[in-house]
Image: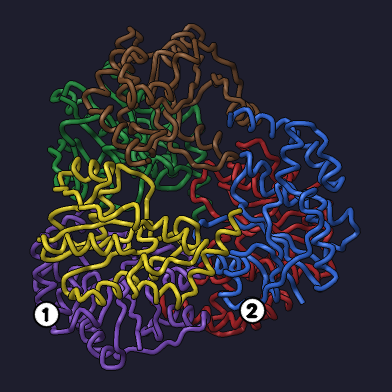
Chain colours: A purple, B yellow, C red, D blue, E green, F brown
């Protein structure tokens, strides 16, 4: 059985990793969709799709998950909700079940005849991409919130400086 | 060292596989970019990006290549050549060298400061996606031109009928 | 004489109906343009262009207005104001006068040489699409604000649940 | 029962009218979709969506078909085949059956779970939009190929001169 | 040496003029890029690219700067930051140095290998496009904030009325 | 009086220069619009908008035409003919008369209420951008067809090699 898990992963943090680990107990293979792929260098979407691809792949390898069990696919937003499911379907290999807690996503996939399951929430208050981005800008105590492989990617691309520059450009 | 190899792979055939095998002797990891990702169901681009992702991944696994050594990335065309390299770079993990024989692609990546190498051509006359598509429509002797994993995907999605329907819609 | 009346109609409510009735006393035929046609499933634009087409048509038939006296046209936003009038003109049959109270719309059509007239406001505080959408989510006392034909369409497509799901996805 | 009939109608000719008449014997209401709505002033798409809307509506009224039995909807092309059915569905009221002889359209709607029926072909050699456009440019004996209501619209907008200007711009 | 200076210039005010004058002491020729060229008639972007072109050109001529020393280029936004530098480069003549104080712009051009210099800030609190737009709507004491050539263009196109209409459409 | 002259200028050749010289006897100022601005590195559009801007400006300066008498504006294609005139108008300063021999362009501007005049044709067979591009690829006897300032720009950007690479990529 193949699952589908969609996110923006800006960046991929320990909460995401926990969700992936839990889903992988239920499925043989997991397709991880990096959404909003065309955006980067903004406050809400600081990292490019390529950088996020690298973060996720490194984190899963670091976690000991075999590359043969997951597929990462970058998908650009089309900003037209009724076409979203058809768009995702055309961009990814076939799948059996969608994992999401997001009500609109759940509805759109269900309306299109897909099986949808919720995902367990692991300390959502603690692990959120928004919080990681804020920690990067303010207190720089962000690295404990992400897998160390992700932390290395962010350091290599000088991601903290980028976040601060975006932040000062916005204001 | 990481290489980058771009194609439309409509579909991925034995010539492509040979190229991948040769490149992999030179690099540690290979990023395979599926271009023109947004198009499908046309004569020139019959298969969706998702179907092509599945074809390539299955073929490489069948060939015994470890999933940890390649990354597949789908990239939509932007139809503005001077932005092409910046677009690809934002969509894929970092790479060290681009493999291509296509003169314009080579120039665009070189102008952007990337290292570019040619790829060996294996019986180009025999193995071309154009020929595979034509064989599907006319003589149906196409399956010897593609890896058997690709042949299975095409059969599962009833790809030959699709090609014939596209062909009769065009004319 | 043919009039043009533009709105998003999210959804079409009793205030809109009153405006249509008033305009129809002045013109032989009315073109009703459903703007922002490409958007749906958002808080501001919950219903698809097709759903809105059905709502308006049913409501006018219910009201006893002959289908031969109105034309409904869906028009996608282009998000470039200086092209708006040329865009609308290319999408709709010819017209003699535009009915609007919206200052920018009035200016754009006037600058393009069109005759523009204001529309009477019927208890704007009471009848607004924003209020209908909020009532759907909070108190569910929305159905008295829309023609009963619209109420039936919203029930058939389970529109209230959709609005609630969009609302909880946003927050 | 509601049917859906899609075309570009460049322009709407006697063959189209015959198809509409035949379908209307089978359905209660017919949705006529004007495709490629955003294009005009080209050799292949000379008339605007608004002009085509007017042509079709006038021709059906002239034919004695009640406006309450048909709905005309303009739909812009999105140029991504796998999203086509979702796009059409979001733009038009609900329907029960699609009428088409076009193999790719038939396949796309069938794959999406819609009922599809073929339409009878009435002297296709004689009545085709391509032939009408060519007659306009060369021999000007085009008006016998279209309903007289369509002929009037083309004359009112000076359509023959437009076709000739487009033709001389192309060459 | 050729410099590049990017802004939206909504409108071009005395602070912009001061920056241009200062840069021109350092360079032989200056390329002035009018960004967000496709937008107009909004609160944030009230003037068209053509109107802004005229404002800047008239103001520099009025200032006594020779037309042979500056080039004005209108550039549409692409809303994808990683492609921004490649986009600008394809739209303008070659340049040697970029003048900007904007952190993200500085980073993007530096990452692409361009030389970037800051610009002196002349009473930023006093001269800002935001303030000019607000003055137009509220107190109409705006004309002392812009070069008189700009003031004339705004009066000729009845720009203050436009700003007020946009403002009342927004609210 | 201000004139408007639109072209793609791929590249700007001696025929274009002759047209500009002739128009300038009739007008005080000339706006030269570089159309299809977003395209480059294709057979039909080899040069970027920025390169074409530089070619035209250098050629006119070389010709002794004062920079204060012409304005160059780059305009992206929108590929929707009915919006073309509104698009151009929003991108360029105001103008009094359009110079063109192109029938569709003439019609579109006339329909929008603009004054249109034809331009004299100077040995069209001899001077055409198509011929210049072909000469670049085949016989390399192209430089006598363009102003020497244009020839210098093409040499500086290694344009002949680019044309040959595009040519071999196409075939």
Q: Which residue is mark 2?
A: C154
Count of all numbered marks drawn on residues in the image: 2
Horizontal arrangement in the rendering, residue A143 relative to residue C164 (left or right): left
Q: Position of residue E98 (x, y in %)?
A: 18, 36
Query: A167 or B70, which is in the foreground?
Result: B70
Q: Which residue is mark 1?
A: A62
CB under 8 Å between discs 1 and 2: no
Give the number of the mark in front: 1 or 2: 1
Residue F142 visible (yes or no): yes
To which quarter of the image does residue D139 belong?
A: top right
User: What's the distance in space between the residues labelled 1 and 2, CA to CA?
Assistant: 50 Å
Could you tell me which residue is drawn at 18 percent across and 43 percent down? Answer: B110
Relative vertical location of residue C24 with respect to residue F34 in this rendering, above or below: below
To which quarter of the image does residue B54 belong?
A: bottom left
Indicate which disc residue C112 carries. none
Query: E75 or F49, which is in the foreground?
Result: F49
Horizontal arrangement in the rendering, residue F84 relative to residue D154 (left or right): left
Relative vertical location of residue D33 with respect to residue B59 in this rendering, above or below: above
Q: Residues within 10 Å of mark 1 (few under 14, many from 20)?
A: some
Query: C49 or B13, which is in the foreground?
Result: B13
Could you tell me which residue is drawn at 24 percent across and 34 percent down? Answer: E5
Q: Chain of mark 2?
A: C
To which quarter of the image does residue F49 belong?
A: top left
Relative vertical location of residue C131 with respect to residue B105 in this rendering, above or below: below
């Amino acid at each position: 059985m193949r699952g589908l898990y969609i996110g923006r992963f800006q960046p991929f943090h320990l909460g995401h990793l926990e969700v992936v680990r839990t889903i992988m107990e239920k499925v043989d293979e997991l397709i991880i969709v990096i959404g909003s792929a065309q955006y980067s260098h903004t406050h809400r979407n600081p990292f490019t799709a390529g950088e996020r691809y690298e973060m996720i792949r490194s984190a899963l390898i670091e976690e000991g998950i075999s590359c043969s069990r997951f597929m990462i696919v970058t998908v650009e937003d089309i900003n037209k909700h009724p076409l979203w499911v058809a768009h995702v379907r055309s961009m990814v290999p076939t799948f059996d079940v969608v994992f999401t807690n997001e009500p609109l996503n759940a509805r759109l996939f269900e309306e299109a005849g897909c099986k949808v399951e919720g995902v367990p929430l692991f300390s959502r208050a603690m692990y959120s991409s928004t919080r990681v981005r804020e920690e990067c800008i303010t207190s720089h105590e962000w690295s404990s919130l992400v897998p160390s492989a992700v932390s290395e990617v962010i350091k290599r691309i000088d991601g903290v400086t980028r976040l601060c520059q975006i932040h000062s450009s916005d204001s």
